Image: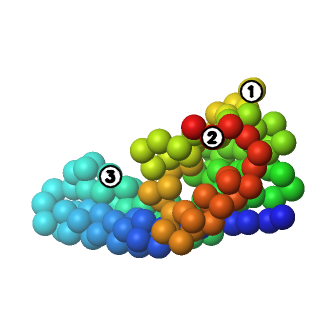
Amino acid sequence: MQMQIPYKKKTIRFNLIMGIVWPIFGIVGLFLHDIKFIDYGFIFLGFLYLLLAYMMHRNKYVTIEDDVLKLKTIPVLNKEVDLKKVTRIKYFAGEYTVFTPEKKLTINTQLIEENQKEILEEFFAQLNVDRV
């Protein structure tokens, strides 16, 4: 079974808007007064927001395939757990925490659409593990 849960569109849109606004502040700052490093910082920050929006749009937040649950945040911090080794699933404060003997993976449901939360809940209900 393969399932992909994307990031919330509102979150991607926010990062895209910030990726446009920060460089505008930096460019306006460069023209209005002497060159300051903070203006270059604004431009760089905007670039990072644009990169983040692109990565969030391209990569899905949660991917389940071949009995492996993958959580893709930023490229360096991707996490995965083997669903066959899951011992317990905990839901608290809008986050699912999936436990295995070796790892712990936390899924923030505030980053996904409402209808996707229901799909994720149904998937976790199908697993025969302890639920807290």
Which residue occupies 13% across, 60% down?
33
| Residue 111 image offset from top left, x and y in percent | 48, 59
Closer to the camera, 62 or 125? 125
Q: Nearer the viewer, residue 62 or 55?
A: 62
Q: Residue at x 74, y 34 (%)?
A: 87
Which residue of the protein is positioned furthest toward the left in this rendering?
33
Tag 1, which secondary structure?
A: loop
Q: What is the x, y in percent for residue 31?
A: 19, 68
Mark 3 and mark 1: Cα distance apart in space? 40 Å
Measured in 3D between alpha carbons, the distance from the residue under mark 1 to the one under mark 2, in whole angstroms, is 18 Å
- Residue positioned 22% across, 55% down in the render: 35
Residue carrying label 2: 131
Name the element at disc 3.
helix
Location of mark 3 (residue): 41
Circle 1 is placed at which residue position? 102
Identify the amino acid type marked 3.
Gly
Q: Are marks 3 and 2 in contact (CB under 8 Å)?
A: no
Left or right: 91 with respect to 77?
A: left
Crowd around label 3: few <14 · some 14–19 · many ≥20 (10 Å): some
Q: Nearer the viewer, mark 3 or mark 2?
A: 2
Mark 2: which secondary structure? strand
* Color style of the picture: rainbow
Q: Quarter-wise, where is residue 17 in the image?
A: bottom left
Q: Are marks 3 and 1 in contact (CB under 8 Å)?
A: no
Numbered badge on residue 37: none
The answer to whether residue 56 is visible is no
Placement of the C terminus among the 4 image quadrants? top right
Q: Earlier in the sequence, mark 3 or mark 1?
A: 3
